[in-house]
Amino acid sequence: MAYIEIAQDTCKGCSLCVNACPKQILEISSDVLNAKGYPTLKCIDPSKCIGCSFCGLICPEIAITVFK
Amino acid sequence: MKKELIKGNIAIAEAAIAAGCQCFFGYPITPQNEIPEYMSLKMPQLGRTFVQSESEVSAINMVYGAAGSGARVMTSSSGPGMSLKQEGISFLAGAELPCVIVNVMRGGPGLGGIQPAQADYYQSVKGGGHGDYHLVVYAPSTVQEAVELTQKAFHTADKYRIPVVVLADGVLGQMMEPATITVPKEEPLPEKTWATTSIGNSSRKPNIANSLYLDPYKLEKHIQHLAKKFDVITENEIMVEYNDIENAEIVVVAYGTTARIVRSAMNTLKKEGINIGLVRPITLSPFPTDEINQACKNANSVLVVEMSLGQMIDDVKIAINGEKPVNFYGRQGGVIPKASDVVDEIKKLRGVI
Amino acid sequence: MKQVFKKTTMLTDKPFTYCPGCTHGIIHRLVAEVLEELGIGQDTIGVAPVGCAVMCYEFFNCDMHVSAHGRAPAIATGIKRVYPDKIVFTYQGDGDLASIGTAETIHVAARGENLTTIFINNAIYGMTGGQMAPTTLMEQKTTTSPTGRSESLGGNPIKMSEILATIDGVCYVERTSVHNPQHIIATKKAIKKAFQNQIDNKGYSIVEVLSNCPTNWGMSPQQSLVWMEENMIPVYPLGVKKEVK
């Protein structure tokens, strides 16, 4: 099963990955702000991740590591 | 090493080559054109670099790239070209990159003229570019001295990681005089461990040629480091020449070509029994403040002679510190003062005329 | 289970200082990945521009020079003449490369210096707060074209890739974009070619990368990518403008 790891403190909540994800399983969550005060990325349905790496490719902060 | 009759500009170029100058970047401007012309032929023959840049701005930035990479590098220019280089000179000073910049001065402001002048003293000694920094400035007065100071400039630049200016003028650049192109014997220099050589197989951190400090406290610390370094240079590197100052009633302060004119005026006056001394600063920066004060101790007054409206006179006044009158005689715009003019001026000062 | 996407060692651990959604981070990563994949990172010396990307000297894990505004090509020339066998690149924005450094840009190309330039075109000055750039589009509002760029007041957008393609000595010019994953992959391919050309001693290579500035365009990051696609690409068509095989 593919999955992603998110470096919460690096994420700036820009949401470019949210729109790039073909499975639409990413969202920016304001539940918890990171140390810099940004809302950060959350994978809402990890079971659907296909490991395509689009999120990692478009992330300007290199905050996403993808496993497949 | 034989003495030859050689033009000042070419002597400077040959001196640089003998001192191991690896790269020359420049742009044509009168009266220094013989330097890039000579370099354009010789440097490639020696497997070294010559680039005629698209502007003086580019030339000085090529110097930055090569200096940051650890090479011995030189550029030369005059007047308007020197103004264009000031941006890069400020960056070189900030990044502590060693290089040699030759200015064969001509008359200004603006396009000015192409005849010799000494009007770039402020620009060279007081800054020219933006920010708090000092350069080392050497002022040769003969072709032989131009050779020796050009070579010394490379050494001083490397020793202290500082841009060094050789401040000549159109007379010195264009005149032919017997000179020997020496091969300098240099003291060992520290290794350039800061140079951007690429990391290669070493485990060191990246080297950065940089003048940016966004944190004001870090920038302040950096500026104070530069200032301390210049204090050490002031302590060790001041050069000054004295002529007949012991019994002089008037001491003249002049540098470069002007000092030669003053010397012939002194000879004339001596025959008339008038004792005049000459102090010739060889380093204009650091300026020989204490040396000038001491040299003028027994004189009644001081005369500064320059091919400008009077720029170095400010530093001489600081040196004399109000202890006696400091007078000025100068010609501007490329007009070279005659020895007889200096004689007349001195006689006027003595109240004879 | 293996990592299929991770950070390259050619970037330092320092977090990027760019605004949320700024594509500088993407392009930094592509350059760094290419340096690692081509095995040239340890032999590379980079030149940072003036502008937002001046900070890239802290991000690329190789020797760097920080240049005066627009002078990166001249500095790179100086470095390359000292080390002809090293890899030298400049990373420059549109103000740097297409305005204050136009002379340096044109002449580094005309000399055919064996260098690689990554040119970031986001049609605005970012660092100084959103002023008009040489590449600002007609009608685009900036802080120095507050009613929109007009020809009479602000002139016309300058197309550097097309200009550089006319210059002998230039080996490779391509314009790409990073507004979606497909184009990011294509951009990386172009950057790789631009560095490979330098390894192969082919002369000057430049990749113009269309980029964004959500902060100064006054848009969300996602809106800015859409704006790039809809407004910038028609003015700055993508593709290879010159390639000497």
Image (cartoon, coloured by chain):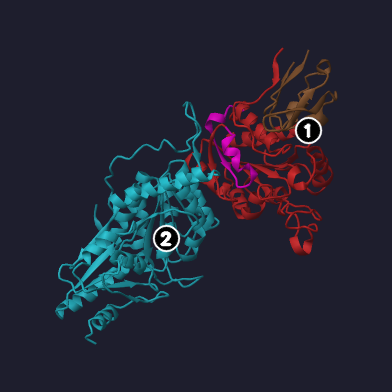
Q: Residue at x 25, y 60 (%)?
A: B291
Q: Residue at x 44, y 71 (%)?
A: B107
Judging by the rendered image, the residue that carries numbered circle 2 is: B126
Q: Is residue B36 visible?
A: yes
Helix, strand or loop under label 1: helix
Question: Which of the two residues, B64 or A38, is positioned nearer the viewer here?
Answer: A38
Question: Which of the two residues, B121 or B43, is positioned nearer the viewer here?
Answer: B121
Question: Which of the two residues, C222 or C168, is positioned nearer the viewer here?
Answer: C222
Q: Is residue B45 visible?
A: no
Question: Residue A42's image quarter?
Answer: top right
The letter of the brown chain is A
Q: Are marks 1 and 2 in contact (CB under 8 Å)?
A: no
Amino acid type, residue under disc 2 in the picture: Lys
Label 1 environment density (alpha carbons within 10 Å; few <14, some 14–19, many ≥20):
many
B6 lies left or right of C4: left
Judging by the rendered image, the residue that carries numbered circle 1 is: A16
Amino acid type, residue under disc 1 in the picture: Leu
Chain C color in figure: red
Q: CA distance from mark 1 to mark 2?
A: 51 Å
* Label 2 chain ID: B
Q: Measured from the top left, where is residue C138 in percent x and y?
A: 80, 55
Q: Measured from the top left, where is residue C206 in percent x and y?
A: 66, 42
What count of labels does the image hold?
Answer: 2
Chain B color in figure: cyan
Q: Which residues are magenta?
A: C38-60
